[in-house]
Amino acid sequence: MASLKEDPILEIDGIKIKEEFEIDKLREDCPALETEGTVIKGESSIDKVREEGSGGQGERDMVPPTSNSIHRSGSRPQLDLSKAAIEGNFEERDPTILLPNQSDDISHLALDIGGSLIKLVYFSRHQDRPTNDKRKKTVKERLGISNGNRRSYPILGGRLHFVKFETSKINECLDFISSKQLHRGGVDSHSWHSDISSNGNAVIKATGGGAYKYADLFKERLGVSLDKEDEMDCLVAGANFLLKAIRHEAFTHMEGQKEFVQIDQNDLFPYLLVNIGSGVSMIKVDGDGKFERVSGTNVGGGTYWGLGRLLTKCKSFDELLELSQKGDNRTIDMLVGDIYGGMDYNKIGLSASTIASSFGKTISEKKELTGYRPEDISLSLLRMISYNIGQISYLNALRFGLKRIFFGGFFIRGHAYTMDTISFAVQFWSKGEAQAMFLRHEGFLGALGAFMSYEKHGLDDLMVHQLVERFPMGAPYTGGKIHGPPLGDLNEKISWMEKFVQKGTEITAPVPMAPSGTTGLGGFEVPSSKGGTLRSDASALNVGVLHLVPTLEVFPQLADPKMYEPNTIDLANHSELEYWFTVLSEHLPDLVDKAVASEGGTDDSKRRGDAFARAFSAHLARLMEEPAAYGKLGLANLLELREECLREFQFVDAYRSIKQRENEASLAVLSDLLVELDSMTEETRLLTLIEGVLAANIFDWGSRACVELYHKGTIIEIYRMSRNKMQRPWRVDDFDAFKERMLGSGDKKPRPHKRALLFVDNSGADVILGMLPLARELLRRGTEESLPFHVASERRILNNLCTNPPFC
Ligand SMILES: Nc1ncnc2c1ncn2[C@@H]1O[C@H](COP(=O)(O)OP(=O)(O)OP(=O)(O)O)[C@@H](O)[C@H]1O
Ligand SMILES: CC(C)(CO)[C@@H](O)C(=O)NCCC(=O)O
């Protein structure tokens, strides 16, 4: 095996890092970027630039350089690099680059003002990294330049937030916008502005009837103009975006069972979109921007809430919904059995328990309204409206031969009984031919669509993996009654946690309002209430903050990147979840110690460590309650959640000191290791390389045996021991099959492998030690033919290589 430096693609040996690079290099990798010949000096980021630039994927996005200072492709955002200059010291690592001519005018707030609720979607730039941690930011990140995809425009990393207010409380919404200065570009507005119209006024995209009704109020209170977007256009754009870009957005819900559906983007259309807001719209969707509103009904969410309020005196929608969980509709609804003397009406397929007439029983009894339990009324009403919508939806699907029906709108509210009832109606009337599916961001379709209508959002061709959903810990997740999004400020978060500590209150994970085991079958069963109380909106809605991470790229040689699922351990399996719950809980004190030590063991870090432990425990408890609370849950998601939680409490890298130690050990033996690998036969080398990767990684994924091993020595010792002296606590599955695919046998050529074979985790040097030779070997092959395997979490490898160069 020759020197790693000869590898033209993955130049990750990096021991000797280039001292400078020129914008020309950047231009080469990101052809759309042009400057007026400015030379920018810096360090190390060249590796990142090169790696990212070499990603291979997205050649389709490449546009030839233009001669002028800024290349524009359509209306997408571009950076104007003209007169770009280093700010401050040239010798500084990754110095900030000023772009004086860049207008930075990307808008980031959109509204859907409906008959019942106002929905806000807003974007905030990532602020994860402490500003003094410049080493972590690459030049490209600072520029907002995308990576290996070679986009011709930047996508800025950040978060999409989802918030809602009751339309009747529009002033609260205006206060919220104003307090966060969202109409002006947010609190970090020094570099981030809303659209400013030619006359200097901010313009916000808005849809829904309220965009017309409240335009003057917005002008008056905030001085902003609402740029009105068509409601149906927005609903469709939002639904298409979610279905294409968000992992596990859609799910089925039958008899209390939630199952996520991974939609194949190439097989999405046509479908029926049913948006259940105050009223209901039914839209046949044939493609992006291709749709027709084929039907609607005025019996919708407003009907349930309005009639329910009158009949039960409930003060809020949630109260009404919560009430239904304790209801028994048989006291209100007339069943087939009530009419047929307890018998089924088999001839037309109706069981005795089928509802013959919603609210029908009340005509035969001489009771006043007060004689009925509000719980029962609420349930009957909910069932009547949900069933009716399900049935009308199916009839419309039938009209157009559509098999899939996606339901959105806030009426659904992630509520099990509602979804079960709709699903039952669709299934019953279609005789199982059509399927009802629900969307996790159910109520935000319109607002997202309005957001998408900004010409400069730059999100239109994001890949699924670039939007990562997170569930930050804030008041709403600890059962607190705080309006708005999760707490953003670190101190706020910590003091929240501390309040719980002081009061000795256990942090209760929010109980999902959707109890499992409810059913609409037969239409009368009583939903089994679990916990009884509804928690705050954010938790009940199960909508996380979408993190946009434009640097994440799928390994370019995957056989089918869209369908690739890196999570091989599915925690939907309860015993698996329990196992990992125990591992992670037991490991928590140790992790906190490490995290605190990585920050110098200061009082502040101890305080943060404590808060982190509580926050993460609450997440774990929440997931034990409802494993699918945050979308489909695989082990990698759980570990990422932990990482994210650490970052929320500003632990940049809990394993920093360990990595340092490992880096030193790795460096010392690297050349030996390469010589050793070079001397092996191809087959032995392949196995050795895989073992190397596993040796490095199983430890990280929580294996107790490896943790013990690790305590006895450094990773390189484990690596050596694993090959020579000891019984390995892991094995390489399917090596023969892999080998055949990898090396080919007889006249068989290597062919793509369907499953992930390598697990690569988010640590730094240890992964790379195993990964380095393997990556090189495989990438060498990859230049000749398609790689025969998938690398799990390959995006993290790139990230790690970029942000934690291992040997420098
Ligand atoms: N906190 C809440 N307050 C009021 N209604 C709620 C709440 N949560 C859920 N809902 C339900 O959601 C419905 C509103 O849904 P959504 O926000 O999707 O529609 P909308 O945009 O307000 O209505 P439309 O599109 O018809 O103008 C309400 O009618 C009610 O049934
Ligand atoms: C009027 C809208 C579109 C406003 O969102 C909605 O409330 C609705 O679709 N209502 C149903 C109206 C009907 O088709 O009968």
Image (tube, rainbow, N blue to C red):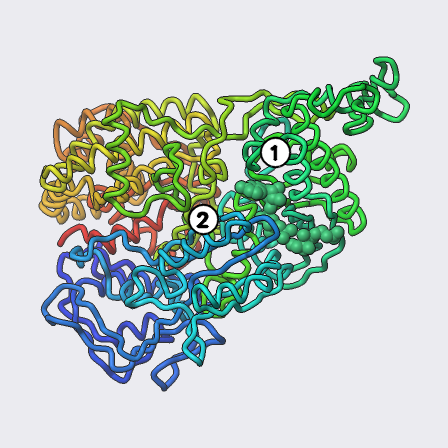
Cβ at disc 1 under 8 Å from ligand 1: no
Mark closer to the observer (1, 2): 1
Q: Where is residue 181 in the image (x, y as percent from the top left)?
A: 36, 60
Residue closer to the observer: 439 or 327: 327
> From this viewpoint, is residue 267 visible?
no
Residue beneath disc 1 = 253
Q: How many marks?
A: 2
Q: Where is residue 271 in the image (x, y as percent from the top left)?
A: 68, 51
Q: How far apart are marks 1 and 2 (CA)?
A: 41 Å
Identify the residue at image location x=51%, y=23%. 532
Element under label 1?
strand
Residue 623 location, quadrant: top left
Residue closer to the observer: 517 or 386: 386
Q: Position of residue 625 (x, y in %)?
A: 44, 25
The answer to whether mark 1 and mark 2 are in CB contact below 8 A is no
> From this viewpoint, is residue 687 visible?
yes
Identify the residue at image location x=53%, y=56%. 447
Residue beneath disc 2 = 750
Furthest toward the right, the residue is: 347
Residue 67 location, quadrant: bottom left
Residue 516 location, quadrant: top right
Element under label 2?
loop
**Callout 2 crowding tier (Cα within 10 Å): few <14, some 14–19, many ≥20:** some
Name the residue type under label 1: His
Residue closer to the observer: 654 or 231: 231
Name the residue type under label 2: Pro
Please indicate whether residue 572 sits to the left or right of residue 34 in the image: right
Looking at the rendered image, the quarter that the C terminus falls into is: bottom left
